[in-house]
Amino acid sequence: MAEAAILGFLQNNESIPDSGKFAAELNLDHEEVKNVIKSLQGFRYIEAKELKRETLVLTDEGKKYAAEGSPEFHFFSAVPEEGSISKDDLEKKLDASVFKIGSTQAAKKKWVAMGKQVSRKVQHVEDKVKESLLLIQQGLELDQESLNSLKARKLIASQGWTGYSDVKKGPSYAPKRKIFATDLTRENLQNWKEMEFKEYNFNAKGQPLDAGHLHPLLKVRKQFKDIFCQMGFEEMPTNNFVESSFWNFDALFQPQQHPARDSHDTFFLKAPSTTRELPEDYVERVKQVHESGGYGSRGYNYDWKREEANKNLLRTHTTAVSSRMLYALAKGPFTPKKYFSIDRVFRNEAVDRTHLAEFHQIEGLICDRGLTLGDLIGVLQAFFSRLGMPKLRFKPAYNPYTEPSMEIFSYHEGLGKWVEIGNSGMFRPEMLQPMGLPDDVRVIAWGLSLERPTMILYGIDNIRDLFGHKVDLDLIKRNPICRVGIE
Ligand code: PHE
């Protein structure tokens, strides 16, 4: 309807100066008129200029007074022409809000004398407020003083208004819009000679796909996985968060009094609180090596307790998985292996900007005859170079299960300093030989967190923005793909 009105009007007239007035005159919805103008303009049927102005509208209270009269007028009318009326009687006669607002306004305007008794000061008054409001409702002009007082009483408010001015014929003007076919249906194709088809818009964007998005940790994990695979590593099965203390600690030659085995550092399970089975003959050898050594070691010289080894926990490192894998490997005829894993571990830590009670560990290990510390340094160099971190330094460190052990530092070009990026070492004979691995077999291994490099790569400085319930979903939807440099 609006479209026919606009195109029809322009056939005989030069222009529509004001879309608002045009809509009002023809009794059309101005929103619809605006939409039609916008669309006709897009197809160049017409040209138009945007028009913005402030208009005044009545608030709900203003509308009420415009219809029923102002409270001061009602208040005044309730006071007798002669004599007076008590304030209490007036209050009973009038609506609470009419009494309250009306008495103040009527007194202010000196229409009435207010005391215990109320009487008129003038004989006749005009309801200016109502009249002014009616004028505004009709879109007519009003003096500034009245406007200010209505605004102060919150009876009117200004509102932004948009419309169009100078609506004229455009280069493709026609009194009626041509309908272009937009679909290649069977019928349209059969009548194609009589039809006009809408041109293809090759610049149009497709519908955004409502697809899933990968979390930054998953993207970085993929990069690490690719590097391990390129270097010939196999992935270890890490699909058990619950582990026994035996595989998490004892098999790794970690003594039972070690502070990491305290509930302040480790989450122990309540149910089931203990593991159901362990390989008995191997357990016996582990007990021996803890208590009195062997394989060239003097052991720790303490009473090793089975109950301690049976306790279930949330694994504190993926090295628990490595110990299971090496034990399994020791059962068959020896074959060299390169293994890796990337998965979640849990520690009972105070949560802050850089620590959570759970994180992901990346772990790599190589198991072969006659490996040396030189091999470890060489493989770390190859691995971290592929990540774009070729400058490495090593610092002697201590782990119960490795000797020697080395912390790994990398030179961070951005920060201009050396930062710790991981931990590494050669697994002890006290760990490998009770498993049954031949005594010339050495295992070199290293571990690092997935969160640290992810935070650096994505410029995130609070770990809670990366992992956990406070993560903003937009971060996951919008973050770019991840590439790490190969030197
Ligand atoms: N398990 C060690 C950690 O939790 C990492 C590590 C793995 C160290 C393998 C040496 C060898 O930090």
Image (cartoon, helix red, strand yellow):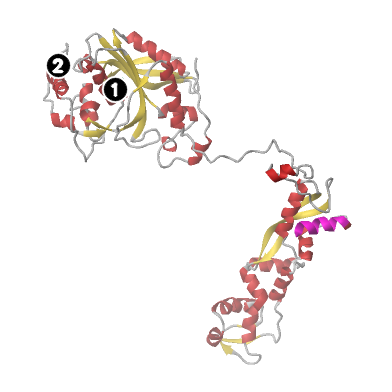
Is residue 389 shown to the viewer in this render? no
**Is disc 1's CB within 8 Å of ligand 1?**
yes
Q: Position of residue 266 (x, y in %)?
A: 26, 33
Which class describes the residues within 10 Å of circle 2: few (<14), some (14-19), or many (20+)?
some
Quadrant housing residue 380: top left
Residues in magenta?
Answer: 1-11
Residue 397, compared with residue 452, is above or below; it is above
Residue 9 located within the stretch drawn in magenta: yes
The residue located at (62%, 78%) in the rendering is 71
Foreground of the two, 207 or 252: 207
Which amino acid, by three-letter code, is at mark 2? Answer: Gly
The residue located at (53%, 31%) in the rendering is 480
**Is disc 2's CB within 8 Å of ligand 1?**
no
Q: Which residue in the structure is indicated by mark 2?
A: 293
Q: Which residue in the structure is indicated by mark 1?
A: 322
Residue 438, compared with residue 205, is above or below; it is above
Residue 105, compared with residue 439, is above or below; it is below
Q: How far apart, in angstroms, are the residues tagged by discs 1 and 2?
A: 22 Å
